Amino acid sequence: MEQNYFQPEHQYYRSEQSIAQVMSQVMKQVYVKMFLALLVTGFVSMWAAGSEVFLNALFANSWGIWVLMGAEVLLVIAISGAINKLSSAMATALFFLFAIVNGLSLAPIFLLYTQGSIASTFFITATTFGAMSIYGYFTSTDLSKFGSILVMALIGLIICVVVNIFVASSTLDWIISGAGVLIFIGLTAWDTQKIKQMALSMPDATNGRLATIGALSLYLDFINLFIYLLRFLGDRR
């Protein structure tokens, strides 16, 4: 009788332990892939900023930056839309290809801002991102209700960015930058919690692909947060 009494508790403990192991494994893969992608982006961006051949080709053609941006959008759509059809290796390869293309498109920031301010802003971004990601992982608050608001705010932000391309308002640019910082701080926490919840509900066989799509989401949050913070904190050359 004593053995039967403790058996359910033991099984529950092992189940909880298994869940924790799955979440830990997936999140480690997410952060490792994201970290490596940021390294790739950083190295590619610094190389491109020091390459006269690349810079001449980029600035000699007004459509050059648009081609890079278009390639980024297509890669995000390809990874997100076909993630269930792609192998884990192919999804990872496309993700790192995206990191390379993004590094090329970010090269001009090394011409606009001092390296010291870029480095300090990167550190601030990493600290802020880390704090919000930890909050999103450990909080018991359901952030899904805030997620829908943040997505709508992001759509509004994109519309404002497009409008300001034609209006060229410095005031609107500051408002966009401030809103961008707040939106991507919130998205970092929400995306982290969403990845954690997906790790609990999806089969173990999909962990590799989940780690890639999760890394892509957090990578985009980090990069955008960095760019908007740089507008405030960056020292122009």
Image: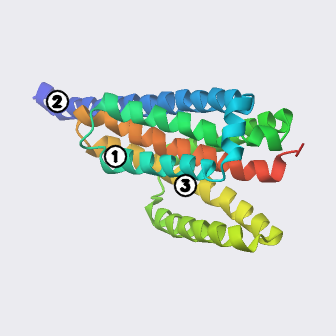
Is label 3 in a helix, a strand or a loop?
helix
Residue situated in front as seen by the camera: 236 or 146? 236
Give the residue number, with chain letter if any, for mark 2. Answer: 7
Is label 1 in a helix, a strand or a loop?
helix
What crowding class fits label 1: few (fewer than 14 Cα within 10 Å), some (14-19), or many (20 or more)? some
- Distance CA(mark 1)–CA(mark 3): 16 Å
Q: Quadrant of the C terminus?
A: top right
- Distance CA(mark 3)–CA(mark 2): 42 Å
Residue situated in front as seen by the camera: 51 or 74? 51
Which amino acid does the dot numbered 3 rest on? Leu
Which amino acid does the dot numbered 1 rest on? Met
Q: Is residue 96 above or below residue 214?
A: above
Give the residue number, with chain letter if any, for mark 1. Answer: 198
Give the residue number, with chain letter if any, for mark 3. Answer: 187
Kindly identify the residue that appears in the image at 25 percent across and 33 percent down: 204
Q: Are marks 1 and 3 in contact (CB under 8 Å)?
A: no
* Snapshot quadrant of residue 20: top left
Residue 128 in the image: state x and y as whole percent: 68, 44
Is label 2 in a helix, a strand or a loop?
helix
Please report whichever mark, 3 or 2, sits nearer to the chain's N-terminal start.
Answer: 2
Q: Nearer the viewer, mark 3 or mark 2?
A: 3
Residue 98 in the image: state x and y as whole percent: 49, 38
* Snapshot quadrant of residue 2: top left
Kindly identify the residue that appears in the image at 48 percent across and 57 percent down: 141
Which amino acid does the dot numbered 2 rest on? Gln
142 vs 52, left or right, is left
Please report whichever mark, 2 or 1, sits nearer to the chain's N-terminal start.
Answer: 2
Q: Is residue 157 visible?
A: yes
